[in-house]
Image: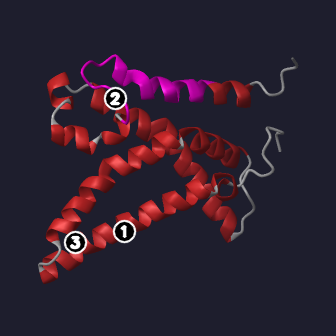
Amino acid sequence: MKDLGYNSHDSVFNLGTIGVFTFIYYLRVMFYYFGAKLYVPRYNKSREYFRRLGKSLFWGEFLFLAMEAYFEFLISGYLNLSEPSSASSGGFWATTLGLYSVVLCLIIVPGVFYYVFKKSQETINEEGFHKKWSGLYDGVKTTRKAPMLFYPIFCARRLLFCIIAFGMWEIPA
C-alpha cells in the first residue's frame, strides 16, 4: 500500500460520512422513483410532492454533494481502484463505491460542466434552469461566464493535485 497518509484503501472507510450522505441521497432517489412511477399513477395522490422532490434531487442536490466532496471522492476512488479490497462483500461495496467515485469525478462532473457552459447566457439566467443546476452556482454570480468557471477550476486544481500526489509519490525530493 502506498503511504499517502491513509490507513486503508477501502472507499467505504475513507469516505465515512460522505459515503453515508451519498447512500441517503440514493435512498431518496429510489423513494422518488417508487413514488413517482408506482404510487402516484395508482392512487393519484402526492403528485406535487414527488414533482418537487424530483426537481430538488436532479441535479441540484447531486451536484452540491459532488462539488463539496470532489476531492474526497477522487482520492477514495483512486486508492480503492489502485489496490482493491478483498473479495468479501465489504470489498465488493468498497470497490463499487470507488468505481462510482472515479466515474463521478472524471466523467459526470466534467460532462455536466460542459453541458451547462455550452448554453447561452440568457438560458443560464432563467430561473428554472438556475434552480435545476444550482449545485454549480452556489455563491457564484451568473451574469457572465467567467465567474462561472470557479467550480471547473476548483475541480481541475484538485484533479491536478491528485495526479501529482499519486503519480509522483516515488520520486525523491
Say which quarter of the image contains residue 10: bottom right
Q: Name the secondary structure under disc 3.
A: helix
Left or right, 8 with reference to 17: right
The residue positioned farthest toward the right in the image shown: 172
In this picture, which residue range is highlighted in magenta? Answer: 138-160
Mark 1 and mark 3 lie on one chain; the one further toward the N terminus is 1
- Type of residue at label 2? Tyr
Farthest residue in the bottom direction? 43
Which mark is on residue 114? 2
Residue at 74% across, 48% down: 83
User: From the image, which quarter does the N terminus lie in?
Assistant: top right
Q: Which residue is mark 3?
A: 37
Check disc 1: other Cα within 10 Å, few if <14, some if 14-19, many if 20+: few
Which quarter of the rendering shows the C terminus? top right
Q: Nearer the viewer, residue 10 or 58?
A: 58
Give the total of numbered labels: 3
Task: Please indicate whether residue 58 sits to the left or right of residue 92 in the image.
Answer: left
Q: Which mark is first along the chain, 3 or 2?
A: 3
In the rendered image of this protein, does residue 122 appear above or below residue 72?
above
Q: Is residue 38 above or below residue 150?
A: below
Please name whichever residue, 60 or 86, is drawn nearer the observer in this view of the structure: 60
Label 2, label 3: how many angstroms apart (C-alpha)? 30 Å
- Tag shown at residue 30: 1
